[in-house]
Image (spheres, rainbow, N blue to C red):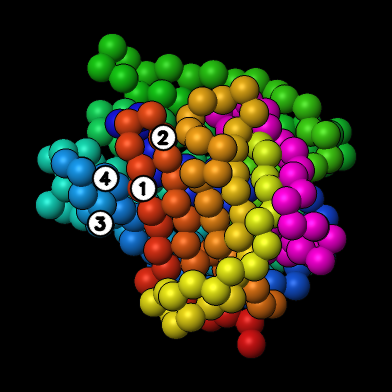
Amino acid sequence: MKYYCFSLFLFLASSNVFFSQNTAVNTNEKLVYTASYTLSGLLTEIAQISLETSPVKTSTATLLKLKFTATTFSKFDNFFKVRDLYESYVNPKTLTPLLYKRDIAEGGFKKMEQYKFNHKDKNIDCVIRKFQKDGEFEDKLTVPNTGNTRDLVATIYNVRNLDFSKLKTGESKSFSFLFDAKEKFMIIKYLGKETISTNLGKKECYKLAVSLKNDNSLKGANDNLLWLSADVVKIPVLAKFKIAIGTGELKIKSATGLLK
């Protein structure tokens, strides 16, 4: 299992088209998901994923903290232990990121990242630390910011502000995002609306197919799918992914603090 397996949910929900003012994401939200993966031919719940928002006051402004955590259930820790934390500090009105932090522990792999977004100079200062058996390694670099570049967590929340009325069924778009301090490109195809059963009841959803350009992490043309609730909050309620070593799903378990 590749170390970024549980980050694929973020990939599946990432895009940056038609972003506008924040009209969907509320302060003090909490979305909880169960993550399932194919083990011995059976789709098995192995982890919990949470997405939370909270206000953070600084000396000059009040920011919105976007927090993503992924934790394997204890009975699976001996198989593949995951303790992932992603945080993005954004402008609450536009969800534009200012600071991003990533601290992951997956199997025997540990890594920390920090991005500082300098919007005035249009660049992003990145620090990456890797912890391995033969020591600790640190890289520092600056990458250009095209103006649309966001971290993964900010992007997953920004996708909820998409105006799907501007997309035709079958229409595809290509978008960029920053991962491991490298620009990645994703193709998202709008498949129309579909009503599905969830733990929150039956939901009419926007259905999306997702693929990565020049990246073989996700397999199949329409095997990586995301369903967003077709309402004002547009929360992810279901995701299905296919990678080289198997398939998985994420299903929403609970949602609190949403806009009415």
For mark 3, what is the residue? 45
Front-lying residue, 203 or 104: 203
In whole angstroms, how far apart are the C-alphas of marks 3 and 4? 9 Å
The residue located at (70%, 23%) in the rendering is 142
The residue located at (63%, 82%) in the rendering is 259
What residue range appears in magenta?
A: 158-185
In whole angstroms, how far apart are the C-alphas of marks 2 and 4? 11 Å
The residue located at (47%, 62%) in the rendering is 238
Question: Does dot 3 land on a helix, a strand or a loop?
Answer: strand
Q: Amino acid at mark 1?
A: Gly
Q: Is residue 49 above or below residue 234?
A: above
Q: Which image quadrant: the N terminus?
A: top left
Q: Earlier in the sequence, mark 2 or mark 4?
A: 4
Residue 175 part of the magenta-drawn span: yes
For mark 4, what is the residue? 38
For mark 1, what is the residue? 248
Asked if marks 2 and 4 touch (Cβ < 8 Å), the reply is no
Q: Earlier in the sequence, mark 4 or mark 1?
A: 4
Question: Does dot 1 land on a helix, a strand or a loop?
Answer: strand
Asked if marks 1 and 2 touch (Cβ < 8 Å), the reply is yes
Q: Amino acid at mark 2?
A: Ile
In whole angstroms, how far apart are the C-alphas of marks 1 and 3? 9 Å
In whole angstroms, how far apart are the C-alphas of marks 4 and 1? 6 Å
